[in-house]
Amino acid sequence: MRVVIAGGGSVGTAIALDLIDRHHDVTLLEQVTETAEKLKSLLPGVRVMTADACEYANLSAADLRNADVVIAATGDDEDNLVVSWLSKQEFGVPRVIARINNSRNEWLFSETWGVDVSVSTPALITSLVDEAVEVGSIINLMDLAGGKMCLIEITLADSAPAVAQSLTLDELRLPDTTRVVAVVRSDQPLVPLPTMRFLEHDHVILIAREDSKQECSSAFIG
């Protein structure tokens, strides 16, 4: 798979190393000359270009039209949005992944700007903090499909209907727009079978349509 990464900071470098270990064809664009030169020796097997990824000509030189994935991983949200938009609108890249540095900008990272998947480290860390203290609340882990879908987690209290009534997953009759994808119990991941019953302190991981995630409360929040 051909992957083009914009940004040669710690995030972009780590992604490039991981992808090259997985035998992908990786190109990395870094606009600071000194940094780019260092990366050429640090990233054997990666094509490192000294270039501003926000410039159309540089993306064209990186052969973006033949890229399968573009990862906008700079430390600047504005740059990541520009790279995402150009990648999708001008080069038709099938999958664009963008890094969000400031969670307040999360609303911008949508299909309008060419973003297929956005990853917000600040939001993820916040959700993990919430997870540690919030039982019986919906914790948003990640937005998917341009914000139309989301990955959420609910830690069950003893008052949750699924626990209090000892209902199976099938008996909960969740809406079609919601799917339980995993249950973590005592640090062990479990496959959510239709006959599964839920216990207090279970961590239920669901994929839900954004406009229907509150419907989960009727089953998992007491």
Image: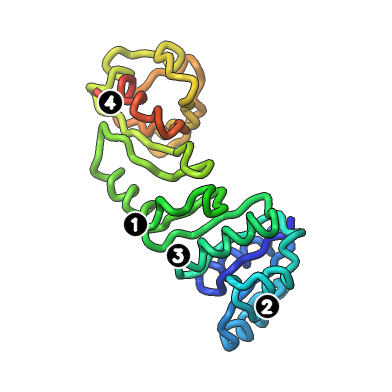
Q: Residue at x 37, y 41 (%)?
A: 140
Q: In the image, what residue type sits under mark 2?
A: Met
- The alpha-carbon separation of the residues under discs 3 and 4 comes to 35 Å
Q: In the image, what residue type sits under mark 1?
A: Arg
Q: Residue at x 32, y 35 (%)?
A: 138
Dot 4 falls on a residue whose secondary structure is loop
User: Can I make out residue 98 in this image?
Assistant: yes
Of 58 and 172, nearer the camera is 58
Disc nearest the viewer among 4 and 2: 2
- The alpha-carbon separation of the residues under discs 4 and 1 comes to 28 Å
Label 1, on which residue?
104
In the picture, the quarter occupied by the C terminus is: top left
Circles 4 and 1: CB distance less than 8 Å?
A: no
Q: Residue at x 60, y 54 (%)?
A: 96
Q: Considering only order in the chain, which callout, 2 or 1, is on the residue closer to the N terminus? A: 2
Of 165 and 60, nearer the camera is 60
Disc nearest the viewer among 3 and 4: 3
Label 2, on which residue?
49
Disc nearest the viewer among 4 and 1: 1
Residue 97 as seen in the image, left or right of residue 186: right
Label 4, on which residue?
221
